[in-house]
């Protein structure tokens, strides 16, 4: 299927590993020019070199923390200067700690808001004016199944990621007239380093082995397996493409059927 993405400029945040990396590679495979970022410069540079070598894609790679509003703004401006504009922006950040409510702290709540909500605000605020100039844009936030179905011991994620959905709906309503589509994707249990951290935390708390934790997650989904990061990336590429030109303000779950609601 022709996606109509060749030579589009795509920003993918937190793309040195996991879901962000898979998404960056998927856009590169479609012929996009990429601006990628992460905190770890060595890991980010390795991804950039791999993408340049494998897909012959143009890549801007800059290390910074997505909770730094000024750094986000400077990164977007650098991408515009290099590529001439921004077409696609995928917001993404690492997940907050796995805890029950009474184990949380005020500082961690503030960090979760900065990391998982304000970072999306910073990116969208920076890219929308450039998309308005073209009267074309795609903004896609990566959150979690927790936006639809709270997960035990993930109270930070359950609360803060829901705010991102409110932002997505608001932006979709306000900027649809400018040709900008705004959607959210929510992964279920997907085989990433983040999930390994969560399995370790659950193992310590429950006394079960990490293998038993993974098996339980797999059994809970109708497909009886964990997701692959590329499966989420493919959904994001489709949402960014011309094939999804009448979809905005939505949350698309890529969860193997884990969500139990209607």
Image (cartoon, grey):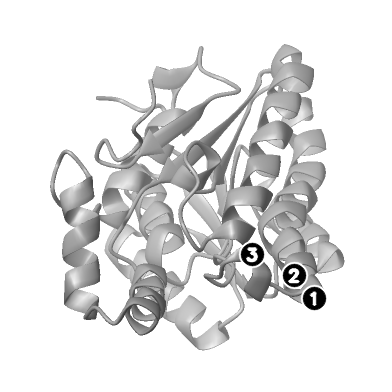
Instruction: Name the secondary structure under disc 1.
Output: helix
Residue 85 makes an appearance in the image: no
**Position of 49 relative to 234 (above/below):** below
Instruction: Name the secondary structure under disc 2.
Output: helix
Relative image position of residue 51 (x, y in whole percent): 37, 65
Instruction: Judge from the rendering whether residue 233 lies leftward or rightward of residue 73; answer left or right.
Output: left
* Front residue of 57 and 103: 103
**Position of 1 relative to 114 (above/below):** above
Relative image position of residue 192 (x, y in whole percent): 34, 67
Which residue has dot 1 on it?
107
Q: Residues within 10 Å of mark 1 (few under 14, many from 20)?
A: few
Instruction: Residue 111: give its label.
Output: 2
User: Residue most toward the right?
Assistant: 70
Relative image position of residue 23 (x, y in whole percent): 41, 52
Q: Are marks 1 and 2 in contact (CB under 8 Å)?
A: yes
Instruction: Residue 101: give its label.
Output: 3
* Front residue of 211 and 165: 211
Q: Residues within 10 Å of mark 2 (few under 14, many from 20)?
A: some
In percent of the image, x 74 and y 75: which residue is there?
105
Instruction: Judge from the rendering whether residue 152 lies leftward or rightward of residue 55; answer left or right.
Output: right
Instruction: Judge from the rendering whether residue 36 lies leftward or rightward of residue 63; answer left or right.
Output: left
**Mark closest to the chain's N terminus, 3 or 1:** 3
Disc number lying in front (1 or 2): 1
In percent of the image, x 75 and y 59: which residue is there?
113
Instruction: Residue 68: give its label.
Output: none
Instruction: Judge from the rendering whether residue 182 lies leftward or rightward of residue 152; answer left or right.
Output: right
Instruction: Name the secondary structure under disc 3.
Output: helix
């Amino acid at each position: 299927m022709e996606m109509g993405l060749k030579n589009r400029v795509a920003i993918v945040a937190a793309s040195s590993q996991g879901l962000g990396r898979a998404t960056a590679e998927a856009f590169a495979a479609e012929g996009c020019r990429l601006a990628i970022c992460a905190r770890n410069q060595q890991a980010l540079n390795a991804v950039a070199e791999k993408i340049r070598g494998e897909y012959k894609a143009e890549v801007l790679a800059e290390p910074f923390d997505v909770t730094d509003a000024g750094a986000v703004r400077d990164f977007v401006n650098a991408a515009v200067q290099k590529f001439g504009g921004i077409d696609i922006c995928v917001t993404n950040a690492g997940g907050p700690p796995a805890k029950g409510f009474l184990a949380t702290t005020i500082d961690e709540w503030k960090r979760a808001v900065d990391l998982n909500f304000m970072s999306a605000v910073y990116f969208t605020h920076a890219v929308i004016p450039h998309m308005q100039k073209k009267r074309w844009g795609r903004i896609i936030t990566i959150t979690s199944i927790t936006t639809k179905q709270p997960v035990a011991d993930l109270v930070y994620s359950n609360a803060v990621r829901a705010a991102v959905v409110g932002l997505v709906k608001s932006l979709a309503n306000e900027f649809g007239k400018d040709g900008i589509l705004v959607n959210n994707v929510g992964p279920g249990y997907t085989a990433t380093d983040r999930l390994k951290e969560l399995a370790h935390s659950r193992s310590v708390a429950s006394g079960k082995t990490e293998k038993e934790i993974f098996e339980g997650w797999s059994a809970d989904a109708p497909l009886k397996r964990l997701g692959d990061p590329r499966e989420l990336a493919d959904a994001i590429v489709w949402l960014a493409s011309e094939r999804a030109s009448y979809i905005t303000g939505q949350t698309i779950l890529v969860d193997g059927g884990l969500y139990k609601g209607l």
